[in-house]
Amino acid sequence: MQDRIAPPKPDFQVTRERGTRPPILETRNLTYRFPNGEVGLFRLSVSFHKGEFVLLAGRNGSGKTLLARHLLGLLRPTEGEVRFRGLPLSTCLREARQKIGLVFQDADTQIIGQTIEDELRFGPENLGLPEKEIRRRVESVIRLLGLEGNLLTPPDRLSGGEKRRLAIGGILTIEPELLILDEPFANLDYPGIVSVLRLLLQLKEKGIGIVLITHEMEKALAHADRLVIMEKGRIVEDGPVQTIAPRAGQYGLHPLDFSQTPLESCTWLPR
């Protein structure tokens, strides 16, 4: 991606808060340059809130994964900042990582436990929680995942959809407030996609914020509260699905005409 981005506007403006809720996580004029000087993210300001389902869309190379890594402090910005509950992320990284979960596209790189139980226990054990609390969280999450009776099963025996759900479950045991998922439907068959999406909707009902990174936005729009589109490392659209989705074709995505395609039909779930 070449550095052909227009000069920044002189006035600094943070993405406004949604209603009266302060954001869990936000970026302020976030800029990232690779070591060779190429721009990856440019003056990017966006916020995410508890209980909100956000679709973060954009063509390949638009900067979606790069942004996700900054949101969890895996990369440090060249300029600007990420803030967690109003504080610079760099000053509260440990606390932020207990409340924000990131699920990578390849579940195999994220799962480290020898069994399902090992994987689900890993997070709360590292938090130093008492055994009784660890068991409570594991039992609660295993029911949510629909994998009861499989605690001793090695993860490599699971299907693609089950592995993706387990990767999510490993984060759920730390009881996050915000879950960021990078292309969670990639390389899954249809039943696997449906099982993951249903799990995400259950989490939304529990009040967990969801940031779903995808280039196939038309398959999950029916469930989104908000659509954010990235292009060349910038936020180019951020707002209601009905307003933004028809303009998606400008950014290499599938545009939607809601007079022809009802919003409620824009889902992977069977009707």
Image: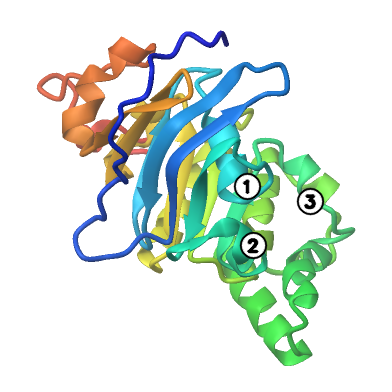
Residue that appears at 71% across and 36% down: 106
Picture quadrant where residue 139 is located: bottom right
Type of amino acid at the residue the image marks with label 2: Leu
Picture quadrant where residue 89 is located: bottom right
How much space separates mark 3 and mark 2, taking CA atoms?
Answer: 22 Å
How much space separates mark 2 and mark 1, taking CA atoms?
Answer: 17 Å
- 73 shown above or below 134: above
The quadrant in which the C terminus is found is top left
Q: Can residue 146 be seen in this view?
A: no
Tell me where residue 228 appears, x and y as whole percent. Answer: 34, 34
Q: Name the residue under label 3.
A: 111
Tell me where residue 55 appears, x and y as whole percent. Answer: 38, 38
Residue that appears at 85% across and 66% down: 152
Q: Mark 1 points at which residue?
A: 103
User: Looking at this view, is 251 or 20 the one in front?
Assistant: 20
Residue that appears at 36% across and 64% down: 205
- 252 shown above or below 114: above
- Label 2's element? helix
Residue 93, label in figure: 2
Is 270 placed left or right of 78 in the picture? Answer: left
Is 236 placed left or right of 196 in the picture? Answer: left
How much space separates mark 3 and mark 1, taking CA atoms?
Answer: 10 Å
